[in-house]
Each structure stands twice: as C-alpha cells, then as structure tokens.
Amino acid sequence: MDTLICMRVFANVVERGSFTGAAKKLGLSNALASKYVAHLEDRLSVRLLNRTTRKVSPTQAGRAYYERCLGILERVDELEDAVQLQSHSPRGHLKIAGPRMMGETFISACVNDFLGKYDQVTVDLALEERTMDLVAEGFDLAIRIGKLADSSMIARRIADYRYVFCASPDYLASAGPLNSPADLTRHTCIVNSVISPSNQWEFIIGGKRKSITVSPRARVNADAAIYNMVLSGRGVGLCLLPTVEADFASGRLVRILQDFEAYDRTVYLVYPHNRHLASKVRAFVDHAAEWFKRL
C-alpha cells in the first residue's frame, strides 16, 4: 500500500477520533480506512491507535508519529497546490455546510457561480439548520449567520445583511392600517420558524429591543417560501432585503415598519485552523467573499 495514503488516513482518524469520520472525509469505506492504518502499524511494528467500541485515540507512539507525519502531509499538499495555482485550476472535492435559511437562495447561487469558475472542483453542499461539527463530519468549511460561538475555527466576516418586514399592496389595502409593531396583533403573519421559534418578532421601540407575539397563519423554515407567500398577498412576512429590493422599486411589495427594524445579520465563512489551507478551500473563501459583496 502507498505509505502516503496510509499516513493521510491515519492523520484523519486521529483528528476525527473515529474511522467513520475519517472514511467519510476521504471517501473510503470504514473497512478500507482500517486496513490502511493496520498496514501502517504492521510496517512500523508499533500500535499507533487505541481502539475501543466508543473511541479511537492515538497511543504515545501514535501521537508522536501523527505530529511528524502531519508536517509531511502539509508539505505535500502545499506542493500540489502550488502546481495547481500556477495553472489556475484548483481541483478536488469540497464539502460545505450552511443553513437552510438563506442557503436555498444566496448560498446555493454562490456555489453555482463557483462551479462555473472552477470546473475541476466538485462540491457537496449540506443545508441544515443545526450547527454541524466541521471536523467530526468531514466538512472543509461552513457558511454561518449571526453571532458565532467561541471556537478554535477561523471565522472570516464576508457580508452584512438585513431582514425587513413587507407585504403586498393588495393585502395592505384589505387588512387595515399597519403603523406600529402593536398593529401586528390584528394582522395575518407569515413567520420564519428558524428566526422566530416562539412566534415573536423583535423590534427597536424607543431605543430598546422589544418582542411582539404574533399569530401566524403559516410557519415556514425557508426564505424563498416566505417570499412567495408574502408576494401572493397571504400576509406580512420577514424577507431578506436583497431579495425584495426590486419588488419595492416596482411596487409589487411594500416595506413596512422600517423605523422599527431589528434584524441585522452577519455572514461568516468558518474553517479549521490549519497552517496550510488547500487551494480548493482558499479559492472558495475568496470567491464567496467577493460574491457576497453584491448583497
């Protein structure tokens, strides 16, 4: 077996604490990942990993070997990336995590543009509302929104954006006045269940952040669906400002309660702290940073 491949599999097992995580990251079966490490141990005549039913951890010899082989793998990756960058063609498989909120619109569009620029890169885009563990689940990077938890990951701020309240002119003509947040208790509302799990909308009233409980006609966890319902006159909803600016200009939608808006958000790119950043990851980070400037 190729020693370099065995080393790469071993390093991934140490970093993820399991053969399953390493196999998923590298696109191997669990059995083959185990076989590579066993071959390495046979070749070195030393046990590198302690294996239990719950956890895999390096032995003392394994930890020392990991620290040395990691440097070798990084130098090999840097050499390959240097060659790729000279030809302007990053390649390989890129696994990206992101939230469904905003993911079905902007994130997917950003990835689509990226694929058009780099035809040697393949992408696995996973959109879920939970915060995924990048290392354990084998992701190269994630797009995250809002305040970030403390982490050893690198976080690059790439955009700021805002959710705004809006409704169709036909709805407003038939539903009555809507001049203050308190008026919402008499209106039909389309609620984003991710942003407002308790059916409460936040506002800045008198310089303070306050919540208004609304009675939703529909609860939806996708921005595009909320936009379509609001556009169809089903009620008042929170929509991403970049998605509705053209509708405001054309008169198809009306921006409401603008003086009370409280939904500013920040978009981050998050990725593991490595001394060497693969060219495919660096290419996407730079691409996304430029792409999101359009928002």
Image: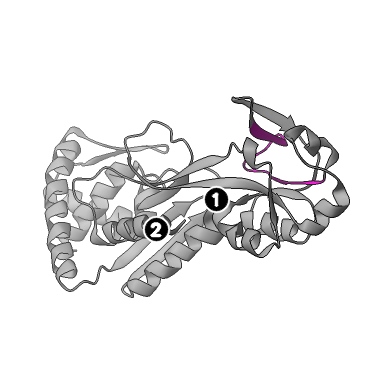
* 10 Å crowding of disc 2: few (<14), some (14-19), many (20+): some
Mark 2 sits on what residue?
Answer: 95
In space, the residues marked 2 and 1 are separated at their CA atoms by: 13 Å
Q: Is residue 12 above or below residue 153?
A: below
The image quarter containing residue 273 is top left
Residue under the point 39% across and 46% down:
134
* Residue sitting at x 81%, y 39%: 215
Instruction: Measuring from the top left, give residue 23's x and y in whole percent.
Output: 36, 55
Q: Quadrant of the N terminus?
A: bottom left
Which circle's residue, 2 or 1, is located before the other in the chain?
A: 2
The reply to whether the magenta stretch includes residue 93 is no
Disc sitting over residue 59 in the figure: none
Q: Are marks 2 and 1 in contact (CB under 8 Å)?
A: no
Residue 128, numbered label: 1
Give the amino acid at mark 1.
Glu
Q: Judge from the rendering whether residue 286 lies leftward or rightward of residue 99; answer left or right.
A: left
Q: Secondary structure at mark 1?
A: loop
**In this image, 181 relative to 205: left or right?**
right
Residue at the spot 64% in from the left edge and 36% down from the top edge: 260
> Which of these two is toward me, 14 or 44?
14
Characterize the local packing of mark 1: few (<14), some (14-19) or many (20 or more) Cα atoms within 10 angstroms.
few
> Which residue is found at the position 65% from the left and 50% from the top?
221
- Rendering coords of residue 208 (x, y %): 60, 24
Callout 2: SS: strand
Front position in the image: 141 or 284: 284
State the scheme by which the image is colored.
Answer: one colour
Q: Is residue 8 above or below residue 112?
A: above
Q: Quarter-wise, where is residue 254 in the image?
A: bottom right
Q: Where is residue 189 drawn, in percent x and y?
A: 77, 45
Question: In the image, which residues are magenta?
Answer: 188-203
